[in-house]
Image (cartoon, rainbow, N blue to C red):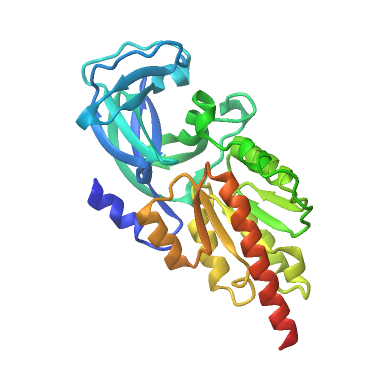
Amino acid sequence: MEKEKEGILLESGTNEIEIMKFTIENEFYGINVAKVKEIMMAERVKAMPHAHPAVEGIFKPRDVLITVIDLGYYLTNEYLEHKDRDLFIVTSFNKMTVAFRVQSIEGISRISWKDIQKPDKTLIRGEEGVATGIAQCDNELVTILDFEAIVAEIAPDTTIQLSEVEQMGDRPICENPLVIAEDSILLQKMIDDALQRAGFTDVKNFNNGQEAWEYLKSIRHDSDLYEKVNLIITDIEMPEMDGHRLTKLVKDDPRLKMIPVVIFSSLIDDQMRIKGESLGADEQLTKPEIGNLVHVIDRLLERFKDRIDNLETE
């Protein structure tokens, strides 16, 4: 598993993803291999009082306490029979380690983000949705789950906290235009709310890297390009075009490369940081760090202004 993960993590801007397929009640679901730490046979867990109904409990492999989420219950709202051959997918993202109970692992498929389609509203839960997209993997339609949104719903304290920005107090209004590529409705709203509270009034949201790239292409030859976009914030996991591919396209373009790019993703770890740096990302932050994101935006906007001022005086 570790060798397979290194292969995709160290490639640059290919717009591909490796999906680990698993089943619950004979339905196929998927998770980005980059989020998978290990696969274990399901173990006995200790129930936790007053926990979310989908939280099965905790267990302690190798002296590390890990929360177990019963993914079958979360998806069906019914307690499914636990079987001897159930598995735990132990994940690592947002600087957290969480295990998810599933019924079987069906292998790994490597596909392009272009082949992942966003599900329509009949497949989403409420206004938010728990699916990143639907993919054709071999002969099966696989629902790629938004594990970040699942954990955010179950444990809101683990995700973006507006209080981090509120603690900064009153900030000046900032009219610098920002472009954001984020496919999760839930997280897009959280980021928007936080940036508005921080004083940023000109934010353009796009649902994936492809939409953001089409917008950037449409303005790249404009004489006032640097008045239309001063900074780009992008997630990594998105249908059609991921954030690494978007970063590569921006930084390979002679007109756009001056614009700062911040990768804001739950997947940032040492290996992903190396990949982002190789693509030219100006900063990379783990998604809950919204307060840190505001400080980074302030610094990069100031640096961008200095660069533009220097261009005008040359």
Residue 167, placed above or below residue 282: above
Residue 212, placed above or below residue 170: below
Q: Is residue 58 left or right of residue 248?
A: left
Where does the N terminus fall, quadrant-wise? top left
Q: How many numbered marks, from 0 up?
A: 0
Residue at position x 65%, y 40% in the image: 167
Q: Is residue 164 left or right of residue 54?
A: right
Where does the C terminus fall, quadrant-wise? bottom right
Rendered location of residue 87, percent (x, y): 26, 26
Rendered location of residue 165, percent (x, y): 65, 42
Residue 273 can be seen, yes or no: yes
Q: Is residue 273 left or right of residue 172?
A: left
Out of 288 and 238, give the one closest to the viewer.
288
Rendered location of residue 36, percent (x, y): 33, 40
Q: Is residue 232 left or right of residue 267?
A: right
Rendered location of residue 56, percent (x, y): 37, 17
Residue 7, placed above or below residue 313: above
Residue at position x 70%, y 76% in the image: 308
Residue 13 can be seen, yes or no: no
Location of residue 98 (image quadrant) = top left
Residue at position x 48%, y 36% in the image: 148
List the single residue furthest toward the bottom. Answer: 314
